[in-house]
Image (spheres, rainbow, N blue to C red):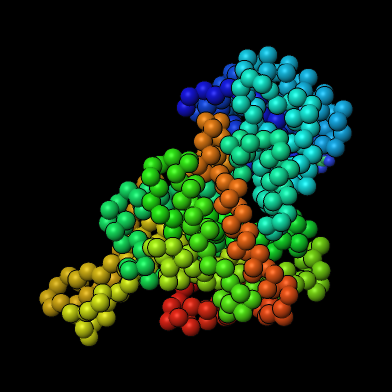
Amino acid sequence: GTEQRALFIIFGGTGDLAKRKLYPSLFNLYRKGFLNENFAVIGTARRPWTDEYFQKVVTDAINSEDALAEDATQFASHFYYQSHNVNDTEHYITLRNLADKLDRKYEIGGNRMFYLAMSPRFFGTIAEHLKSQKIVTTEGYNRVIVEKPFGRDFASATELNDAIGRYFPEKDVFRIDHYLGKEMVQNILAVRFGNNLFRALWNNRYIDNIQITLSEALGVEERAGYYETAGALRDMVQNHILQIVALLTMNMPASYSEEDIRREKIYALKSLKKYTPAQVQANFIRAQYTAANGQRGYREEEKIASDSATETFVAGKLFVDNENFSGVPIYVRTGKRLSQKRSRIDIAFKTMPTNIFAPQPLGQNVLTINIEPEGKIFLQINVKQVGQGFTLKKSHLDFFPTSNGKQVFPEAYEKLFADALAGDATNFTHWEEVAYSWKFVDAIRTAWDQHDYALEEYPCGSMGPVAADKLLARDGHKWFYTG
Ligand code: NAD
């Protein structure tokens, strides 16, 4: 890649996300030449670490093999640590001095990337101090990358957005949805707008229904404190699932550009059909995992209330009421402690209007985009069985983006970092996307909070409650992915 000059300031530099995702991704960009001599990283958090200790944490985090040890040491030598309490103005002055010094030392030219990898309640105060203490430069760019969750409803997201927006214009705010950095999610636009075959069929005349499953095998793990206040609807549907819905249902953008793509995604999310409470009850199911297969139930987990009403599973039917998709049911589901970790999209096409082979049945054409664990695109078709007579059978056309279908994709964060360095926000969520997503989700959340709608149960290791199957059965459909 082309070398980029940038000073990264990572707030929450000692945190889990920084160690697991950010440092390894930056290292990969270094090895690929996107970062070389003219960059530096300041990690800041409350703990009093030295630069040496921080550099050791970074090399441990990237877990380099011996062959790379020299690379890793070189890379880590660009890392500096500044102990910092985000509420303390004095600390920002120290931070500015260090930033300016490193900018000169590495000839960075004033380009700054502020990565907010800590609790969103600090974003406002950080943004304010970056401006007032002149840590934002007058030469070069100043971009702020923010992590999820972006609010917990429309009102709090607006507040958060205003707090950042007072100091950083929309074009410099890069809101992370790491699903947008995944190869197979990015492949949705390639499939849709690169193939006339699919373009022609991608509408309510030919598509019968769409199914999106983001299933996790893990339980709440260390994030229990946060999860208990969020739940699956906020944690997965508002962002990842609705982003996938937008990519699947948006109209064709005028060009493959940030501006045109985000505009069409905004329209798609604006077109989500808002539900009344009674419609929420009919179309959305929430559930909690219960003990099974040697695993604890949600209410038995540490830091979780024994009478918790937080949902660990959501299934729903939604509609995008635009020209091409009104009337197409989009079934979505996500949950923890399901039978497998998998992210998958199934697009079911309508069957032939007449079947000349009757009484032999015709299978439905289904396009499956498997996002993870393996990347795969799979198109189910009907063909003739080899031999005498004429018997139909189901077969499929496969596409594996890598030779063996195994995960050799770049880490999502690596792709997103490279985009942010290039100033390309295509794969980051625009504020209006966030806003429309929250409005849709708020209607569901409010209905759940104000009414006594059922909280279903499902055993650990299953694919969710029976109610989630009934949701489709009612329409004569079934989940293609059964776990
Ligand atoms: P963490 O608790 O591991 O780290 C938080 C960091 O913030 C630490 O470095 C801590 O020292 C620092 N910090 C806290 N209070 C501070 C203060 N007053 N002044 C200065 N520093 C302070 O959290 P994490 O898991 O790394 O997550 C960070 C953010 O990223 C959160 O908003 C989280 O929701 C989001 N996120 C995390 C993950 C993940 O996989 N860990 C995934 C998606 C989003």
Residue at point 49% right, 52% down?
265
Q: Position of residue 357 (x, y in %)?
A: 19, 80
Q: How many marks?
A: 0
Regarding ligand 1, which quadrant of the image does it lie in? top right
Q: Give the answer, above or below, for where 440 lies relative to 123.
A: below
From this view, report whether residue 480 is shown above or below residue 8.
below
Q: Nearer the viewer, residue 72 or 97?
A: 97
Q: Is residue 39 left or right of residue 400?
A: right
The structure residue drawn at horizontal position 68% and vertical position 57%, both measured from the top left corner, is 154
Whether residue 72 is visible here, answered yes or no, is yes
Q: Nearer the viewer, residue 231 or 196?
A: 196
Residue 462 in view in this figure: no
Q: Name the residue furthest left.
A: 388
**Residue 386: x and y, percent?**
17, 70
Location of residue 378 in the rendering, given as x and y in whole percent from the top left corner:
36, 60
What percent of the width, then of the height, locates residue 465? 60, 77
Q: In this picture, is 11 found above or below 434? A: above
Eyeballing the image, is 29 above or below 336? above
Q: Is residue 26 left or right of residue 199?
A: right
- When asked about the image quadrant of residue 460, the answer is bottom right
Please tell me which residue lies in front, 278 or 463. Answer: 278
The residue shown at (38%, 51%) is 252
- Residue 206 in the figure: left or right of residue 128: left
Quarter-of-image position of residue 145: top right
In the picture, residue 71 is in which quadrant? top right
- In percent of the image, x 66 and y 61: which residue is there? 234
